[in-house]
Amino acid sequence: MGFGEAAPSPEAMVVRPRLRVNSHGAAHALACAVALVACACERMGSAADFEITATYAHDATAYTQGLLTADSVLYESTGRYGVSDVRRVHIRTGEVLARTPIAANQFGEGLAMHAGKLYQLTWKAGAAYVYAPETLAPLDSFRYTGEGWGLASDASRLYMSDGSDSIRVLVPETFAVERVIRVRYRGAPLLRLNELEVFAGMLLANVYESNWIAQIEIGSGEVLRMLNFSDLYPRRPPRADVMNGIAVTPDGTQLLLTGKLWPTMFQVRLRSSTTP
Protein backbone atom coordinates (compact mmCIF):
# COMPACT_ATOMS: atom_id res chain seq x y z
CA MET A 1 0.00 0.00 0.00
CA GLY A 2 1.43 3.36 -0.99
CA PHE A 3 1.68 6.20 1.50
CA GLY A 4 -1.40 8.39 1.51
CA GLU A 5 -3.65 5.69 0.05
CA ALA A 6 -6.88 4.79 1.79
CA ALA A 7 -6.52 1.97 4.29
CA PRO A 8 -7.82 -1.37 2.95
CA SER A 9 -11.05 -2.57 4.47
CA PRO A 10 -10.81 -4.99 7.40
CA GLU A 11 -12.17 -7.69 5.08
CA ALA A 12 -8.95 -7.38 3.08
CA MET A 13 -7.13 -8.72 6.14
CA VAL A 14 -9.18 -11.91 6.05
CA VAL A 15 -7.69 -13.60 3.01
CA ARG A 16 -7.62 -16.82 1.02
CA PRO A 17 -4.51 -19.01 1.37
CA ARG A 18 -1.50 -17.39 -0.28
CA LEU A 19 2.22 -16.94 0.28
CA ARG A 20 3.46 -13.51 1.18
CA VAL A 21 6.65 -11.91 2.51
CA ASN A 22 6.38 -9.51 5.41
CA SER A 23 8.80 -6.64 6.01
CA HIS A 24 10.70 -8.80 8.50
CA GLY A 25 11.76 -10.71 5.38
CA ALA A 26 10.09 -14.02 6.25
CA ALA A 27 7.59 -15.74 3.96
CA HIS A 28 4.56 -17.18 5.69
CA ALA A 29 1.12 -18.41 4.74
CA LEU A 30 -1.99 -16.55 5.75
CA ALA A 31 -5.12 -18.63 5.46
CA CYS A 32 -8.79 -18.28 6.12
CA ALA A 33 -11.70 -20.36 4.88
CA VAL A 34 -14.29 -17.65 5.42
CA ALA A 35 -15.50 -15.54 2.47
CA LEU A 36 -16.93 -12.16 3.34
CA VAL A 37 -19.10 -9.74 1.41
CA ALA A 38 -17.35 -6.44 0.61
CA CYS A 39 -18.48 -3.40 2.55
CA ALA A 40 -18.07 0.36 2.42
CA CYS A 41 -14.86 1.29 4.28
CA GLU A 42 -16.25 4.57 5.53
CA ARG A 43 -18.76 2.66 7.64
CA MET A 44 -15.89 0.86 9.36
CA GLY A 45 -13.88 3.92 10.30
CA SER A 46 -12.55 7.24 9.10
CA ALA A 47 -10.71 10.35 10.24
CA ALA A 48 -13.77 10.92 12.43
CA ASP A 49 -12.45 8.08 14.63
CA PHE A 50 -9.82 10.33 16.21
CA GLU A 51 -8.42 13.81 16.60
CA ILE A 52 -4.74 14.71 16.89
CA THR A 53 -4.11 16.65 20.10
CA ALA A 54 -0.29 16.89 20.00
CA THR A 55 2.75 15.81 17.99
CA TYR A 56 6.18 14.90 19.34
CA ALA A 57 9.58 14.11 17.88
CA HIS A 58 10.42 10.42 17.47
CA ASP A 59 13.72 8.73 16.62
CA ALA A 60 13.52 8.15 12.87
CA THR A 61 16.05 5.31 13.15
CA ALA A 62 13.83 3.35 15.58
CA TYR A 63 12.11 0.35 14.00
CA THR A 64 9.31 0.53 16.55
CA GLN A 65 7.96 -2.81 17.78
CA GLY A 66 6.56 -2.06 21.25
CA LEU A 67 5.56 1.17 22.97
CA LEU A 68 4.26 2.06 26.45
CA THR A 69 4.37 4.75 29.12
CA ALA A 70 4.98 4.47 32.85
CA ASP A 71 5.70 7.23 35.37
CA SER A 72 5.65 9.82 32.54
CA VAL A 73 8.44 8.01 30.68
CA LEU A 74 8.09 6.39 27.27
CA TYR A 75 9.52 2.89 26.88
CA GLU A 76 10.15 1.45 23.44
CA SER A 77 11.30 -1.84 21.95
CA THR A 78 12.97 -1.65 18.54
CA GLY A 79 13.63 -4.33 15.97
CA ARG A 80 15.97 -5.34 13.13
CA TYR A 81 18.95 -7.62 13.47
CA GLY A 82 22.06 -6.01 14.91
CA VAL A 83 20.33 -2.88 16.23
CA SER A 84 17.41 -4.13 18.36
CA ASP A 85 17.13 -2.69 21.85
CA VAL A 86 14.86 -1.63 24.70
CA ARG A 87 14.96 2.06 25.58
CA ARG A 88 13.72 4.85 27.83
CA VAL A 89 12.60 7.91 25.87
CA HIS A 90 11.58 11.45 26.79
CA ILE A 91 7.97 11.66 25.61
CA ARG A 92 7.96 15.27 24.47
CA THR A 93 11.43 15.57 22.90
CA GLY A 94 11.98 12.03 21.63
CA GLU A 95 15.42 11.98 23.25
CA VAL A 96 16.66 8.48 24.00
CA LEU A 97 17.57 8.60 27.69
CA ALA A 98 18.95 5.06 27.99
CA ARG A 99 19.03 1.87 25.96
CA THR A 100 19.97 -1.77 26.38
CA PRO A 101 20.73 -3.75 23.21
CA ILE A 102 19.86 -7.38 22.68
CA ALA A 103 22.03 -9.94 20.88
CA ALA A 104 22.81 -9.07 17.26
CA ASN A 105 21.26 -12.32 16.06
CA GLN A 106 17.91 -11.52 17.70
CA PHE A 107 15.11 -9.27 16.48
CA GLY A 108 13.32 -7.24 19.17
CA GLU A 109 9.52 -7.23 19.25
CA GLY A 110 6.67 -6.36 21.65
CA LEU A 111 7.08 -4.69 25.02
CA ALA A 112 4.92 -4.61 28.16
CA MET A 113 5.19 -3.34 31.73
CA HIS A 114 3.93 -5.74 34.39
CA ALA A 115 4.36 -5.59 38.16
CA GLY A 116 7.11 -2.99 37.84
CA LYS A 117 9.14 -4.93 35.28
CA LEU A 118 9.59 -4.59 31.52
CA TYR A 119 8.99 -7.67 29.34
CA GLN A 120 10.37 -7.73 25.80
CA LEU A 121 9.68 -10.33 23.10
CA THR A 122 11.91 -11.43 20.24
CA TRP A 123 10.64 -12.34 16.80
CA LYS A 124 12.02 -15.81 16.02
CA ALA A 125 14.42 -16.53 18.90
CA GLY A 126 11.67 -17.80 21.22
CA ALA A 127 13.10 -15.69 24.03
CA ALA A 128 11.52 -13.02 26.24
CA TYR A 129 13.64 -10.73 28.39
CA VAL A 130 12.78 -8.96 31.65
CA TYR A 131 14.34 -5.63 32.64
CA ALA A 132 14.35 -3.17 35.51
CA PRO A 133 12.59 -0.05 34.12
CA GLU A 134 14.80 2.42 35.99
CA THR A 135 18.11 1.06 34.68
CA LEU A 136 17.09 -1.30 31.83
CA ALA A 137 19.30 -3.88 33.53
CA PRO A 138 18.38 -7.49 32.57
CA LEU A 139 16.62 -9.38 35.37
CA ASP A 140 15.29 -12.62 33.89
CA SER A 141 14.34 -14.43 30.70
CA PHE A 142 11.70 -16.89 29.48
CA ARG A 143 11.27 -19.26 26.56
CA TYR A 144 8.19 -19.64 24.36
CA THR A 145 7.26 -21.42 21.15
CA GLY A 146 6.49 -19.77 17.82
CA GLU A 147 6.99 -16.15 16.83
CA GLY A 148 6.72 -13.16 19.16
CA TRP A 149 5.04 -9.99 17.82
CA GLY A 150 3.06 -7.79 20.23
CA LEU A 151 2.85 -7.77 24.03
CA ALA A 152 0.60 -5.98 26.54
CA SER A 153 -0.46 -6.22 30.19
CA ASP A 154 -3.72 -5.58 32.03
CA ALA A 155 -1.98 -5.77 35.44
CA SER A 156 -3.13 -9.38 35.79
CA ARG A 157 -1.94 -11.21 32.68
CA LEU A 158 0.24 -10.67 29.63
CA TYR A 159 -1.24 -10.76 26.13
CA MET A 160 0.97 -11.87 23.25
CA SER A 161 0.35 -11.82 19.49
CA ASP A 162 2.21 -13.84 16.88
CA GLY A 163 1.00 -12.35 13.59
CA SER A 164 -2.04 -14.60 13.31
CA ASP A 165 -5.59 -14.16 14.64
CA SER A 166 -4.57 -15.66 18.00
CA ILE A 167 -3.58 -13.83 21.17
CA ARG A 168 -2.03 -15.88 23.94
CA VAL A 169 -2.89 -15.06 27.54
CA LEU A 170 0.29 -15.64 29.55
CA VAL A 171 1.05 -16.08 33.24
CA PRO A 172 3.75 -13.40 33.72
CA GLU A 173 5.73 -15.34 36.35
CA THR A 174 6.24 -18.37 34.09
CA PHE A 175 5.19 -17.32 30.57
CA ALA A 176 2.87 -20.34 30.56
CA VAL A 177 -0.09 -20.08 28.18
CA GLU A 178 -3.30 -19.84 30.21
CA ARG A 179 -5.64 -19.64 27.22
CA VAL A 180 -5.75 -18.42 23.63
CA ILE A 181 -8.07 -15.66 22.41
CA ARG A 182 -9.25 -16.14 18.82
CA VAL A 183 -9.91 -12.67 17.44
CA ARG A 184 -12.97 -12.42 15.19
CA TYR A 185 -14.17 -9.56 13.05
CA ARG A 186 -17.78 -10.04 11.95
CA GLY A 187 -17.43 -13.75 12.59
CA ALA A 188 -14.18 -14.27 10.68
CA PRO A 189 -10.56 -14.49 11.90
CA LEU A 190 -8.71 -11.17 11.83
CA LEU A 191 -5.13 -11.86 10.84
CA ARG A 192 -1.79 -10.04 11.23
CA LEU A 193 -2.37 -8.82 14.77
CA ASN A 194 0.81 -7.07 15.86
CA GLU A 195 1.55 -4.42 18.53
CA LEU A 196 -0.86 -4.60 21.48
CA GLU A 197 -2.04 -2.24 24.21
CA VAL A 198 -4.75 -2.40 26.88
CA PHE A 199 -6.88 0.75 26.94
CA ALA A 200 -10.19 1.43 28.70
CA GLY A 201 -10.61 -2.27 29.49
CA MET A 202 -10.17 -3.38 25.90
CA LEU A 203 -7.27 -4.69 23.85
CA LEU A 204 -6.02 -2.56 20.96
CA ALA A 205 -4.05 -4.22 18.17
CA ASN A 206 -2.22 -2.79 15.18
CA VAL A 207 -3.12 -4.79 12.08
CA TYR A 208 0.26 -5.26 10.44
CA GLU A 209 0.93 -3.47 7.14
CA SER A 210 -2.22 -1.38 7.46
CA ASN A 211 -3.50 1.81 9.06
CA TRP A 212 -6.13 -0.06 11.08
CA ILE A 213 -6.25 -0.65 14.83
CA ALA A 214 -8.67 -3.27 16.12
CA GLN A 215 -10.54 -2.65 19.38
CA ILE A 216 -11.00 -6.11 20.88
CA GLU A 217 -13.19 -7.37 23.73
CA ILE A 218 -10.72 -9.34 25.83
CA GLY A 219 -13.09 -12.02 27.07
CA SER A 220 -14.60 -13.06 23.75
CA GLY A 221 -12.05 -11.88 21.20
CA GLU A 222 -14.77 -10.04 19.29
CA VAL A 223 -13.65 -6.91 17.43
CA LEU A 224 -15.93 -4.18 18.71
CA ARG A 225 -14.62 -1.48 16.39
CA MET A 226 -12.06 -1.02 13.62
CA LEU A 227 -10.27 2.32 13.91
CA ASN A 228 -9.04 3.84 10.66
CA PHE A 229 -5.82 5.87 10.95
CA SER A 230 -5.12 6.40 7.25
CA ASP A 231 -5.35 10.16 7.81
CA LEU A 232 -2.95 10.14 10.76
CA TYR A 233 0.25 10.57 8.73
CA PRO A 234 -0.58 10.54 5.01
CA ARG A 235 2.52 12.48 3.88
CA ARG A 236 5.17 10.29 5.42
CA PRO A 237 8.79 10.68 4.31
CA PRO A 238 9.93 7.96 1.88
CA ARG A 239 11.96 6.11 4.53
CA ALA A 240 9.07 5.83 6.99
CA ASP A 241 7.70 2.30 7.19
CA VAL A 242 4.35 0.98 8.42
CA MET A 243 2.31 2.23 11.35
CA ASN A 244 3.16 0.37 14.56
CA GLY A 245 3.26 1.40 18.19
CA ILE A 246 0.41 2.10 20.63
CA ALA A 247 0.86 3.57 24.10
CA VAL A 248 -1.54 5.12 26.59
CA THR A 249 -0.73 8.68 27.67
CA PRO A 250 0.43 9.04 31.29
CA ASP A 251 -2.97 10.44 32.32
CA GLY A 252 -4.68 7.37 30.83
CA THR A 253 -7.09 9.30 28.60
CA GLN A 254 -5.45 9.36 25.16
CA LEU A 255 -3.14 7.34 22.93
CA LEU A 256 0.37 7.82 21.58
CA LEU A 257 0.83 6.38 18.08
CA THR A 258 3.87 6.08 15.83
CA GLY A 259 5.40 3.75 13.26
CA LYS A 260 8.57 2.02 12.20
CA LEU A 261 11.20 4.63 11.28
CA TRP A 262 8.74 7.49 11.81
CA PRO A 263 10.20 10.88 12.82
CA THR A 264 6.93 11.80 14.53
CA MET A 265 4.76 10.42 17.34
CA PHE A 266 1.13 11.52 17.53
CA GLN A 267 -1.07 12.01 20.57
CA VAL A 268 -4.69 11.28 19.69
CA ARG A 269 -8.07 11.31 21.35
CA LEU A 270 -10.50 8.64 20.20
CA ARG A 271 -14.00 9.79 19.32
CA SER A 272 -16.98 7.74 20.39
CA SER A 273 -18.87 5.77 17.78
CA THR A 274 -21.73 3.31 17.68
CA THR A 275 -20.50 1.77 14.42
CA PRO A 276 -18.31 -1.34 14.85
Image (tube, rainbow, N blue to C red):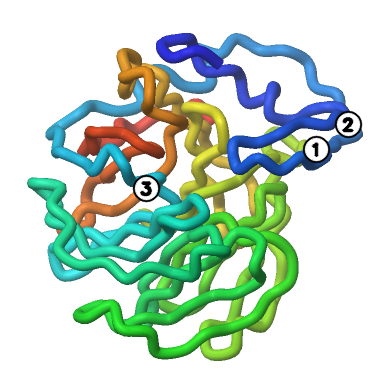
- Amino acid at dot 1: Leu
Left or right: 180 in relation to 211 = right
Residue 212: assigned label: none
Q: Position of residue 228 (x, y in %)?
A: 45, 25
The answer to whether one can see residue 202 in this image is no
**Residue 51 lies in quadrant:** top left
- Amino acid at dot 2: Pro
Q: Which residue is found at the position 49% from the left and 70% from the top?
A: 103
Q: Is residue 171 above or below residue 265?
A: below
Q: Mark 2 or mark 3, which has the lower sequence index?
A: 2
Q: Which residue is found at the position 22% from the left and 81% from the top?
A: 135
**Disc 3 secondary structure class:** strand
**Residue 219 lies in quadrant:** bottom right
Residue 30: assigned label: 1
**Disc 1 secondary structure class:** strand
Q: Is residue 256 above or below residue 20?
A: below
Q: Position of residue 91 (x, y in %)?
A: 14, 52
**Disc 2 secondary structure class:** loop
Quadrant of the drawing holding the N terminus: top right
In whole angstroms, how far apart are the C-alphas of marks 3 and 1?
Answer: 24 Å
The answer to whether one can see residue 215 in this image is yes
Instruction: Identify the residue under disc 2.
Output: 17
Asked if marks 2 and 1 touch (Cβ < 8 Å), the reply is yes
Q: How many marks?
A: 3
**Residue 270 lies in quadrant:** top left
Instruction: Identify the residue under disc 3.
Output: 246
In whole angstroms, how far apart are the C-alphas of marks 2 and 1?
Answer: 6 Å
